[in-house]
Image: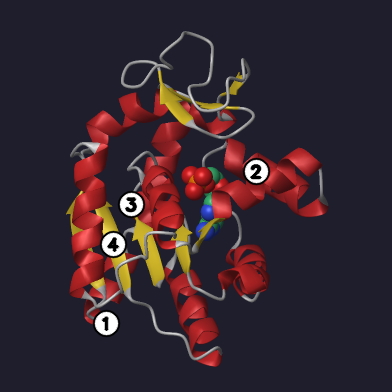
Amino acid sequence: MELILLGPPGAGKGTQSKLLEARYGVAQISTGDMLRAEVKAGSPIGQEAKKIMDAGGLVSDDLIIRMIGERISRPECENGFILDGFPRTVPQAEALDKLLHETKVDLDAVIELKVDEVVLVERISGRFTCAKCGTGYHDTFKQPKISGVCDICGSHEFTRRADDKAETVHARLEAYNAQTAPILPYYRAKHRLFSVDGMAEMDEVERQIEAVLREVGVPEPTASA
Ligand code: AMP
């Protein structure tokens, strides 16, 4: 399965792509996660990306395309992948087409999570994750069952993304509208674009995504996947 999840920051791409990764056994690739790992490691890529990420802008197409090219050629992507946060510009979408053409792989679907931007700011600015296992939580919508303890791994450490501050969120939404939204007509013209209601409950969004996957002929996951 080769799938792209599109949508503004906070639309639920990360949550849904992790659910799909677990269910279908394909690799979730988040360029945001890859960049945050580079920043944490203090690598040259991380140093180049940090300022732009902190300001809510987009990192250069060249850098991102090189990172993705290396990543999707790895053996763990043999069964396919879910792209979360890539492509984010038309040149990135064109570069992805070229990469897929070279490896003779076809995209199954591009799924847009449609959301109301006013709600996004509230969604994003309240989110935090377990520092150990990455499980996502929210101040208003999803607190851990025991305050300060991760439901999944029991860790007491949580982190918040530096770019989830309200000011930065507005810049990220602007970047989405100016640079990423133009990808939608690009994929619509290729008859690959589907939309689901990103404002629905998490289970319902998952159900709608799975309905699209059935429609485009992605085989049902086996029970062990
Ligand atoms: P995300 O976790 O997808 O919201 O990404 C966090 C930040 O990383 C974004 O605000 C951008 O600064 C940067 N980033 C992630 N993916 C891309 C991409 N495909 N192109 C350019 N910048 C990106």
Q: Is residue 68 above or below residue 137?
A: below
Q: Whole-percent x and y of residue 138?
A: 40, 22
Determine whether the residue tagged by mark 3 lies in a helix, strand or loop: loop
- Mark 3 and mark 2 lie on one chain; the one further toward the N terminus is 3
Q: Give the residue pinned by disc 2.
A: 36
For image coordinates 44% across by 73% down, the residue present is 93
Q: Give the residue pinned by disc 1.
A: 190
Marks 3 and 1, how far apart at CA: 18 Å
What crowding class fits label 2: few (fewer than 14 Cα within 10 Å), some (14-19), or many (20 or more)? some
Q: How many marks?
A: 4
Marks 4 and 3, how far apart at CA: 8 Å
Q: Which mark is residue 7?
A: 3
Q: Is mark 3 within 8 Å of ligand 1?
A: no
Determine whether the residue tagged by mark 2 lies in a helix, strand or loop: helix
- Mark 3 and mark 1 lie on one chain; the one further toward the N terminus is 3
Question: What's the residue type where badge 3 is placed?
Answer: Gly
